[in-house]
Amino acid sequence: MTLAALSIDQVETFAVALPTLRSFGVSGGSVAVAGRPSIRVLVKVSADGVHGWGEATPIPAWTYETTESIVTTIDRYLAPAVVGRPAWDLDGVTTAFDRAINRGFSIGAPLAKSAVDIALHDLLGRAAGVPLGVLWGQRRAEEVQLAWIVSGQTAEEVADCVAEGRQAGYRAFKVKIGLHSEETDLGVVAAVRAEAPEAPLWVDANQAYTCDTALRLAGRLLELGVTAFEQPLPANDVAGLRRLRDASPLPVALDESLRHPTDLATFVKLGAVDVAIAKVQRSGGLTLSRRLCQLAEDSGVRLMGSGLTDGDLGLAASLHLFSAYGITGPVDLNGRQFIESAYATGATVKVADGVAHVPTGPGLGVEVDEAVVRRLAVDVLTARS
């Protein structure tokens, strides 16, 4: 059967409990807790006997979507909007999504939309028998350097974390700041630099600061060899971000501010962005992420890459996107550091010495064991795991 003939006939959701390897927090709160399962929502899209898988990462500490809301949004709104549509019509699916869940001032349930969009891409690649880069005609890199995430708050914790990353072969580091006081944040960054004097290093505040605080910190971070200041201000503080970009000696990278490609267009028009972070789930999937990356490239805005503590499905989706636009890293795709993708029991993403290899198998290039998915599935709507 040709791609043109494939019609979406089913969309299924599975909230799965994955083993958590390490604890992880951002300025908004906890992301992962060692010893407590990490929930990911997997989506299986079927079209005339062909299947594709996608994934959403619920992080209420980072955005408003919960595990429960992702499941119900897909099951009750997004799935009915796309069943019966041509599987190849990604543009039409995006329009149907916006009609089902209006994006308003944001993108409107981006994590839920992303999971279905990724699954459709996987399905199309599998139907064609090619990886996504071949499907797009755009694959500029075969490897992407990863960064080890540091979120410790004492010099001893930081030293241990950096040493663990270096032992695993990582040679770049990203530091989560904004969790405590300015001096504590600077102390953490200084401790990382002391342990890794030559390593590429950037910081992510996850919207924690005011413009004045960020300006005070920027110069001192530059002295520590930090290369970028990621999302220092609230996402919607456009005036503050423009002021910061004009005055900061350190390049300002936008993440949460860039939900939709039109958000990037606004910042470009205002001259308020140095670096755009490509993040698949934040932007509602690969379809809109490709539009955002192309706009950045055409506008002369530098691209960096990030993820949401994804499992291997999300990791693969990000790698294909980054490969397509030559984002070779270091990038923050930290899922392997904090969770185990127990559902990926066949072919998956190869990571060695802090370098991820872009998958070469059809679609995402990740083989999902559906029996394992069903065994790990939990009913999040009637009981909490």
Image (cartoon, rainbow, N blue to C red):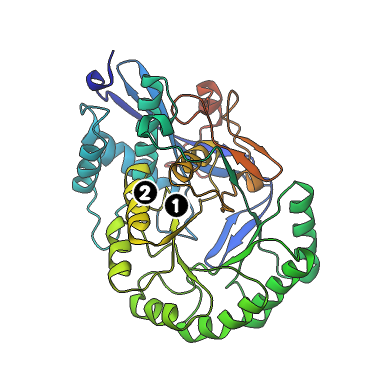
Looking at this view, name the residue that lies furthest to the top.
1
- Check disc 1 and give the amino acid type: Lys
**How busy is the neighbourhood of tag 1: few (under 14 within 10 Å), some, or many (20 plus)?**
many
The picture quadrant where one finds residue 228 is bottom right
Q: Nearer the viewer, residue 271 or 162?
A: 271
Quadrant of the image for the C terminus?
A: top right
Distance between the alpha carbons at the discs numbered 1 and 2:
7 Å
Q: On the rendered image, what quadrant is the N terminus found in?
A: top left
> Residue at (26%, 20%) from the top-left corner?
6
SS class, disc 2: helix
Circle 2: residue type:
Ser
Circles 1 and 2, Cβ within 8 Å, touching? The answer is yes
- Give the x, y percent position of residue 172: 67, 56
Side (left or right) of 316 relative to 161: left
User: Dot 2, how many residues are within 10 Å of its Cα: few (below 14), some (14-19), or many (20+)?
Assistant: many
Circle nearer the N terminus (1, 2): 1
Give the residue pinned by disc 1: 279
What percent of the width, then of the height, locates residue 100?
21, 45
